[in-house]
Image (cartoon, rainbow, N blue to C red):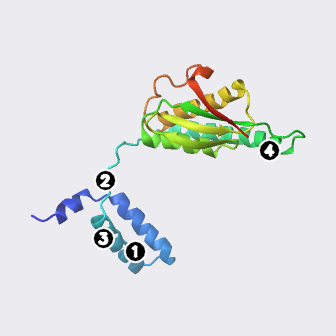
Amino acid sequence: MSRFPSHLAKMRLGSLLVLTTVWVVLWGRPSWGTVLFGLLVALLVVLLFPMPRAASRIRFRPLSLLRLVAFFLYDLLRASLQVAWLAIRPRPIEHGRIAAVQLHETDDFRRTIIAELTSLVPGTVVIDLDPASNELVIHVLDRCDDERLLIEVTAIHRREQLVARAFGAPAPPGCGERLSMSEVRDVEAGP
């Protein structure tokens, strides 16, 4: 028996549809010929370059995902107003701070989402996400005291909880508990 039927069994319909849609969009004019040829190209790509199965199963919880989006939009608006105030206030911006935040999440996909959401919020930049130590190294703009840094770290842990729930996992143990500065490693004070 040949390998061809086993490849057909492993093909994913979603991959074929996405690749065919990309082909049609790139050609700009949908027609039966473009769709059929796109399906043929997609079939060849899936057969010649099979993708491995994802290590983590992703499940969406719609209500939790809505909660995550609402929290992110609120956080985005709040941080945007703070950064706008920093730009127009009469005194200069104070020194920022670089800190390593211990994440509780162990799944790579969810850790990446947490890092991306953190980096998208103005005033905070993710410098590194270390999978070995499970630390998220961040730079926080104009936050020189411990209290303001803890507020930012608390927001990261809140995002961590919401991401876990939105993508089908229980909140990681220890996430969302009251924080102290002993749980945040100060990397260095930056300009």
Q: Which of 96 and 175 is in front in this view?
A: 96
Q: Nearer the viewer, mark 1 or mark 2?
A: 2
* Residue density around tag 4, few if under 14, some if 14–19, many if 20 or more, within 10 Å: few
- Quadrant placement of the C terminus: top right
Where does residue 10 sit, x and y in percent of width and height?
25, 57
Q: Which amino acid does label 1 sit on?
A: Val
| Residue at disc 1, secondary structure | helix
Q: Nearer the viewer, residue 21 or 116?
A: 116
Q: What residue type is labelled 4?
A: Ala
| Residue at disc 4, secondary structure | helix
Is 89 left or right of 18, judged from the image as shown?
Answer: right
Is 147 left or right of 12, judged from the image as shown?
Answer: right
Q: Which residue does the numbered mark 1 point to in the structure image? A: 35
Q: Which of 98 and 157 is in front in this view?
A: 98
Disc nearer the start of the sequence (1/2): 1
Disc nearer the start of the sequence (4/3): 3
Q: What residue type is labelled 3?
A: Leu
Asked if marks 4 and 1 touch (Cβ < 8 Å), the reply is no
| Residue at disc 2, secondary structure | loop
Q: Which residue does the numbered mark 2 point to in the structure image? A: 52
Can residue 9 be seen in this snapshot? yes
Disc nearer the start of the sequence (3/2): 3
Query: In which image quadrant can residue 68 be found?
Result: top right
* Residue density around tag 3, few if under 14, some if 14–19, many if 20 or more, within 10 Å: few
Disc nearer the start of the sequence (1/3): 1
- Compared with 3, 67 (above or below) is above
Task: Name which residue lies at 46% across and 23% down.
Answer: 173
